[in-house]
Image (tube, rainbow, N blue to C red):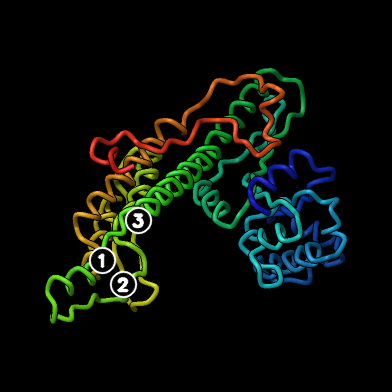
């Protein structure tokens, strides 16, 4: 299921959401209900291994895919595990079950008639990992035990604050996806309009007999725009807009060269490295990378300023329902406000 299909299932589906999110404290009780006593494991790893086996059997049971289970809430370890060789969230979506992740770390002791959520360390990392695995939403809970206005006010404020943190990640991924998609569309539209030659073709035509070859085989499509030159700054700019800063502390390792690492203290350094790689490999001209970077940054900036903004709520008219495939929202622009690039659209 894709994102829109999962949204439709949760909005319109008829069924229930299964709780497969028992964590450390509740796991022994869950295993006991399954017929496994505490003597069956000697440490937490073995205990969590047993609970994952139990959940795997549940997920792969034919009745679980009968259509009555709309979604399933996963414990972090379950999300990170596999079912029949597939990441657990994918195993769920493959049978039509929408995956959710439990993000709370349990409840505080009761105070003023309510139980607040405990602090959630590492939440940002968990949300990013969950999104990358295809998890649809989150689950977290606090408890109201009595009608205490002061306690309820504090509890509600905590829930809304947590919701803002979760939604911020959704906003980042939305900005990334829109910026990358729009930059990609513009890049390939211009490539096959300009049909500009690659360095391999140009050098050997202008200087016959040199037999110049690039370091790698030249891609079999036109040179201008450079896709790496537009998409990299589009994505980086979306991240910069989200963070409000260019500063990072990131070390990456090569997947092909042993012991080869690169450290970045700036997001812009990543763009510079990508540009240099495309030039030194012999795929692009520096002038192309400069202009491609300008396009990518402009697209991400436009998306941030025009699409990543809160809209006033309004009543949707009868003919505006998105049942006919027509998106009700901002129109797609063919041009971005660039003096140099406007004439190229």
* In the rendered image, the vertical position of residue 255 relative to residue 331, given as above or below: below
- Residue carrying label 1: 198
3D distance between C-alphas at marks 2 and 3:
15 Å
Rendering coords of residue 344 (x, y %) = 30, 43
> Which quadrant would residue 156 be assigned to in this image?
top right
* In the rendered image, the vertical position of residue 210 relative to residue 73, given as above or below: below
Visible in this render: residue 232? no
Asked if disc 1 and disc 2 are in contact, CB closer than 8 Å, the reply is yes
Asked if disc 3 and disc 1 are in contact, CB closer than 8 Å, the reply is no
Total number of numbered discs in the rendering? 3
3D distance between C-alphas at marks 1 and 2:
8 Å
The quadrant of the image that shows the N terminus is bottom right
Rendering coords of residue 286 (x, y %) = 19, 58
Dot 1: within a 10 Å radius of its alpha carbon, few (fewer than 14), some, or many (20 or more) residues? some
Which of 41 and 52 lies nearest the eye of the viewer?
Answer: 52
Task: Give the mark, 3 or 1, whose residue is nearer the N terminus.
Answer: 3
- Residue carrying label 3: 191
Judged from the image, the secondary structure of the residue bearing numbered disc 2 is loop
Which mark is nearer the camera, 2 or 3? 3
Judged from the image, the secondary structure of the residue bearing numbered disc 3 is helix
* In the rendered image, the vertical position of residue 192 relative to residue 111, given as above or below: below
Which of 71 and 13 lies nearest the eye of the viewer?
Answer: 13
Rendering coords of residue 88 (x, y %) = 67, 62
């Amino acid at each position: 299921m894709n994102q829109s299909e999962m949204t439709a299932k949760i909005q319109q589906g008829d069924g229930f959401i299964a709780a497969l999110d028992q964590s450390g404290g509740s796991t022994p009780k869950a295993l006991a209900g399954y017929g496994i006593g505490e003597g069956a494991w000697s440490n937490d790893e073995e205990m969590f291994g047993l609970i994952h086996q139990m959940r795997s059997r549940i997920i792969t049971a034919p009745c679980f895919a009968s259509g009555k289970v709309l979604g399933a809430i996963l414990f972090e370890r379950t999300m990170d595990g596999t079912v029949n060789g597939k990441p657990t969230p994918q195993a769920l979506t493959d049978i039509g079950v929408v995956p959710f992740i439990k993000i709370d770390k349990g409840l505080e002791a009761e105070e003023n008639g309510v139980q607040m959520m405990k602090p959630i360390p590492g939440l940002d990392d968990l949300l990013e990992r969950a999104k990358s695995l295809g998890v649809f939403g989150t689950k977290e809970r606090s408890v109201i035990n009595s009608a205490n206005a002061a306690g309820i006010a504090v509890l509600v404020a905590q829930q809304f604050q947590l919701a803002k943190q979760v939604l911020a990640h959704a906003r980042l991924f939305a900005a990334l996806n829109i910026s990358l998609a729009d930059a990609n569309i513009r890049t390939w539209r211009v490539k096959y309009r300009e049909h500009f030659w690659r360095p391999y073709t140009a050098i050997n035509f202008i200087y016959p007999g040199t037999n110049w070859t690039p370091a790698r085989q030249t891609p079999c499509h036109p040179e201008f725009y450079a896709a790496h030159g537009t998409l990299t700054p589009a994505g980086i700019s979306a991240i910069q807009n989200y963070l409000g800063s260019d500063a990072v502390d990131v070390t990456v390792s090569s997947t092909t060269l042993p012991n080869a690492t690169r450290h970045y203290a700036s997001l812009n350094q990543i763009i510079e490295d990508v540009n240099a790689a495309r030039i030194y490999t012999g795929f692009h001209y520096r002038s192309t990378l400069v202009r491609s970077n300008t396009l990518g940054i402009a697209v991400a900036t436009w998306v941030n300023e025009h699409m990543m903004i809160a809209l006033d709520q309004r009543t949707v008219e009868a003919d505006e329902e998105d049942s006919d495939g027509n998106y009700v929202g901002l129109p797609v622009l063919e041009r971005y406000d660039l003096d140099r690039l406007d004439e190229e659209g």
